[in-house]
Image (tube, rainbow, N blue to C red):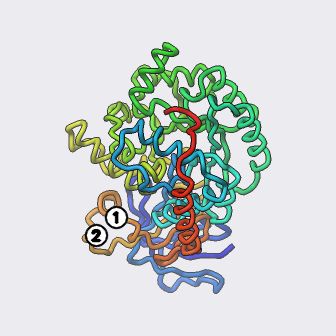
Amino acid sequence: MNKTLLRNATIINNDCSLDKNKDIYIEDGKIKKIVNSYDNAFVSEDYEIIDCSNYYITPSFVNLHSHAAMNIFKGIAEDVTIDDWFNKEIFPYESKLNEKDVYYGVKLAILEMLNNGVTAFADHYFCQDSVVQAVLDCKIRADIAPTIFGLAPNYKEQLETVKDFIIKNRNVSNRVNLRLGPHAPYTCPNPILTEIVDAAKELNIGIHIHVSETKEQVDNSYKEASKSPFEVLYESGGFDVDTIVAHGLWVQEDDLQYINDKTWFAFCPKTYMKLAMGEGNIYKLKDKINYTFGTDGGASSNTLSPLEQARLFALNGKLLENNSEEFRIKEIWMHLMKGHNALKFNTGKIEVGYDADLIIWNLKKSNTYPIYNPVTSIIYSSNSNNVLYTMVEGEFLKYDGKLMLNENETLNKISEIQSSILERGKGNKIVEY
């Protein structure tokens, strides 16, 4: 592995404190030492030295809920109701996707995420072999949860295929984690959900599941099961394992009794706003749950930036709660960084022994200057142009503003796939939203 010295840097910590004039030594993918900067300090020739005198360094970002391959549907279904978005557009188009579509869709998403400083994402999708191959080829980190639809005619086959995939790939890379992805309680009703959770326990892995995404889902759950979706998941044993709750927009106060420290919520406010899913309860209950941010798929969010999602969460929260003193900068930054806690990759802190998954920021640009508080500049003003370097385990995947992957190849393939998607048209959806 390369050795890198980030010289004379200002470190932004997870509590928003600053450590100025620091030299960060990175070796074998890890932060080896952090010392005060000295201009004449001897450094061996095998270190690449990057002068960070005018830059800020933070841990990278984590995207806790994504459907990365859906980036190929970006812009395909706009200005429609959420029911029509799923049932008349996305599900029918998805039914005709193939492994190649998913592979390049994921690569397209990874390019965008790396450009935004994202070094790890939790993905919930099918064609899992293509997902993991794209992740390996692009050298990013991923927590992959193959989607399982319990109401699909081939449910049993799905579950066995996914279990075999987990066993085959569980040690494929230290940059890949795996878990099961039951779609939702309403598409995996009990006893099916219990069976999936039991499989996760047998495999010693977690689950990633959509829960209480809309008010209608909650209302229907009470009608059909006399329980909330969270209670259904609890009774299945879903909170006995590490669980990523996608959305949870309509979580209720009574649901809090079922969750625990192994439960992480992934908020994706851009989707909720765009598809008019209501204000939900997460803005009121945020202090009682573990949460960070996801992007959902490119078809609903159009961009893959957890930072943008955090920004929207703060702004929308201030508006909905009619309180500009809430959703403070420090709180939002700390929760943005907590994505690392959810995925457990030994990342998320700039401390000796942690893997070097970092962003080097250039905030001396017109959109972020002057800098009174660098965290404020990042949260409310920055964009991908301010992300100068993105590092994964000591390896630069964005260097001096340029991605280190073959972007043009992926874009050309996506152009072909876009034409093919329109030619193939829509098929029969697997389930009803």
**Is any atom of residue 376 visible in this view?**
yes
**Where residue 395 sits: x, y (%)?**
61, 70
Q: For numbered disc 1, what is the local secondary structure?
A: loop
**Residue placed at 26% from the left, 65% from the top?**
372
Question: Which of the 4 quarters of the picture holds residue 106?
Answer: bottom right
Question: Which of the 4 quarters of the picture holds residue 321?
Answer: top left
Lower position in the chain sequence, tag 1 or tag 2 = 2
**Is any atom of residue 25 visible in this view?**
no
**Where residue 205 sits: x, y (%)?**
69, 38
Give me the C-alpha separation between circle 1 and circle 2: 7 Å
Q: In the rendered view of the protein, which quadrant contains the N terminus? A: bottom right
Q: Nearer the viewer, residue 72 or 376?
A: 72
**Residue placed at 61% from the left, 55% from the top?**
102
> Which residue is tagged 1?
382
In the picture shown, does residue 378 fall above or below 210? Answer: below
Q: For numbered disc 2, what is the local secondary structure?
A: loop
Asked whether the beta carbons under mark 1 and mark 2 sit within 8 Å of each other, the answer is yes
Question: Which of the 4 quarters of the picture holds residue 13?
Answer: bottom left
Give the farthest residue toward the top: 226
For disc 1, the neighbor class at 10 Å (few under 14, some 14 to 19, many from 20) is: many
> Which residue is tagged 2?
367
**Where residue 206 sits: x, y (%)?**
64, 37
**What residue type is disc 1 on?**
Ser
Left or right: where does residue 149 sit relative to residue 80? right
**Residue placed at 63% from the left, 24% from the top?**
237
Left or right: where does residue 322 sit relative to residue 331? left
**What residue type is disc 2 on?**
Asn
**Where residue 30 sits: x, y (%)?**
63, 64
